[in-house]
Image (tube, rainbow, N blue to C red):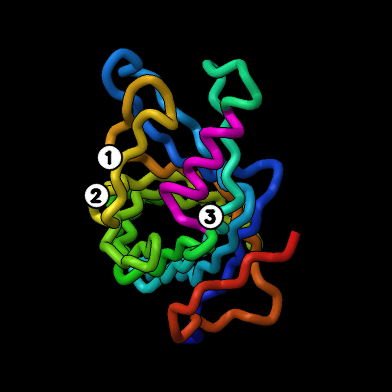
Amino acid sequence: MPDQTIRYEIRPSTESTFILEVFKTGLLTGKKHLLFFEQYAGEIDYNRERPEGSTVRLTVQASSVTCQDPWIKSKDRRKKIAEVAVNDMMAANQYPQLNFCSTRVTSQAKGQYEIEGSLTVRGIAKPVTLHAAVRPVGEHRLELDGDAQIDLKDYGIKPPSVLLGVVGTKSKMTLRFLTWAEKSVGREKAFTDCAPPPVPAQ
């Protein structure tokens, strides 16, 4: 049988969101910061007949964060929160990218997958599991909707406190994404390494 693995490319679009949710503690328990990444790129080698043979890699530009908290009215305050995330949490000047590379894909139900892999933050690689729903749209597009739990302590990062408000934040954060992947013309074979795909220049 011919190889049914097809490569799809992930790029930012007006239909897509890639968000890190940072949860507050203390007096502001129940609130969260919404940090949107605006620059990222990814590649999926997807096999519809044998999805467990699929592979995913993704790179995110750490400096592309914007804060869009609806409960913080001050634009200057939201800008300050984004700066703390970029400079203190992710140290973007020294580590400009966050990279994910899958190591195993497991089917959970129709269109539902666990994607195990390695997430590199500040030069430290740790195992992470993405929970994702994948929906083919025609022959040329995939819709991906999912999330993953990330613990800052795994990367030696102390949860920000005063700079993100009068009280601290939790160490465990949630990465959520709703994005589209478009079929890559002329590149249907699976990639053979896990070098991060380049983020397009803005």
Quarter the C terminus occupies: bottom right
**Tag 1 near tag 2, CB within 8 Å:** yes
Closer to the camera in the image, 139 or 166: 166
Magenta part of the protein: which range?
Answer: 78-92
Quarter-of-image position of residue 119:
bottom left
**Residue linked to disc 3:** 62
Vertically, is 147 above or below 49?
above
Q: Measure how far apart labels 3 and 1 are at the Cα level.
A: 18 Å
Badge 1 crowding class, 10 Å Cα cut-off, few under 14, some 14 to 19, many 20 or more, is some
- Nearer-N-terminus badge (3/2): 3
Per the image, the residue denoted by label 1 is: 171
SS class, disc 3: helix
**Front residue (pair 118, 143):** 118
Res 153 label:
2
Calculate the distance from the C-alpha at mark 1 to the C-alpha at mark 2: 6 Å
Residue 162 screen position, x and y as percent:
38, 28
First along the sequence among labels 1 and 2: 2
Could you tell me which secondary element the residue under label 2 belongs to? Answer: helix
Q: Residue at x 39, y 62 (%)?
A: 122
